[in-house]
Image (cartoon, helix red, strand yellow):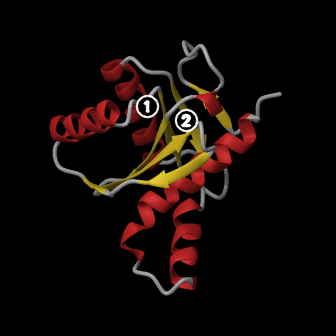
């Protein structure tokens, strides 16, 4: 049974999500955290944080990543407030989910990523590391949770 947290925007994929190379995107107004799911190794790895520019430039960078990594599906983190309500950030993530599906013709899912950035900061600080990569760590955490829920 599918978790209520996962909401598929599009269902044209032919394989389960765990068997796809999936790009996770943690959308922010200034940065996008990025992570990739490796279906053979069943592991997630972070990519460099994308510092946002203009929409066309952001899409061009995402296109290069999708091509270079042979991406077969995209997961967009969906920030839901602690009260369970949607926010302007939620609307922005939904915008990106629809845009990515349209632009790249890939299956797209959105998944609740509440508190993922906070958890990423906690992990990095506990390891004594710089928190500048928190957005991609947050994308990786969301991707891993999504994959666990999809089993």
Count residues near mark 2 (Cα–Cα under 10 Å), then give few for <14, some for 14-19, many for 20+. many
Q: Residue furthest front?
A: 40
Q: Say whether residue 32 is left or right of residue 86.
A: left
Q: Which residue is at 34% across, 22% downward?
A: 104
Give the quarter of the figure containing the C terminus. top right
Element type where label 2 sits in the image: strand
Q: Do the residues labelled 2 and 1 touch (CB within 8 Å)?
A: yes
Q: Say whether residue 145 is left or right of residue 47.
A: right
Element type where label 1 sits in the image: helix
Q: Where is residue 85 in the image (x, y as percent from the top left)?
A: 61, 47
Give the quarter of the figure containing the N terminus. top right
Q: Where is residue 123 in the image (x, y as percent from the top left)?
A: 57, 75
Q: Residue furthest right?
A: 1
Q: Which residue is at 34% across, 33% downward?
A: 66
Q: Which of 51 and 93 is in front in this view?
A: 51
Count residues near mark 1 (Cα–Cα under 10 Å), then give few for <14, some for 14-19, many for 20+. many
Is 151 placed above or below 148 here? above
Residue 62: mark: none
Is residue 113 among the parts visible in the rendering? no
Is residue 125 among the parts visible in the rendering? yes
Q: Nearer the viewer, residue 73 or 77?
A: 73
Q: Position of residue 92 (x, y in %)?
A: 39, 41
Q: Name the residue under label 2.
A: 110
Is 67 placed above or below 82 here? above
Q: Name the residue under label 1.
A: 97
Q: Residue furthest bottom?
A: 128
Q: Nearer the viewer, residue 119 or 36?
A: 36
């Amino acid at each position: 049974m599918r978790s209520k947290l996962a909401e598929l925007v599009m269902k044209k994929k032919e394989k389960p999500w765990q068997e796809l190379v999936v790009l996770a995107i943690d959308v922010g107004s200034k940065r996008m955290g990025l992570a990739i799911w490796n279906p053979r190794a069943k592991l997630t790895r972070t990519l460099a944080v994308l510092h946002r520019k203009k929409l066309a430039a952001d899409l061009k960078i995402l296109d290069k990543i999708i091509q270079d990594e042979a991406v077969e599906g995209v997961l967009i983190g969906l920030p839901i407030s602690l009260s369970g309500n949607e926010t302007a950030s939620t609307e922005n993530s939904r915008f990106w989910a629809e845009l990515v599906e349209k632009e790249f013709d890939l299956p797209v899912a959105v998944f609740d990523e509440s508190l993922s950035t906070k958890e990423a900061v906690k992990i990095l600080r506990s390891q004594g590391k710089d928190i500048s990569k928190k957005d991609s760590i947050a994308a990786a955490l969301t991707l891993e949770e999504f994959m666990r829920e999809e089993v």
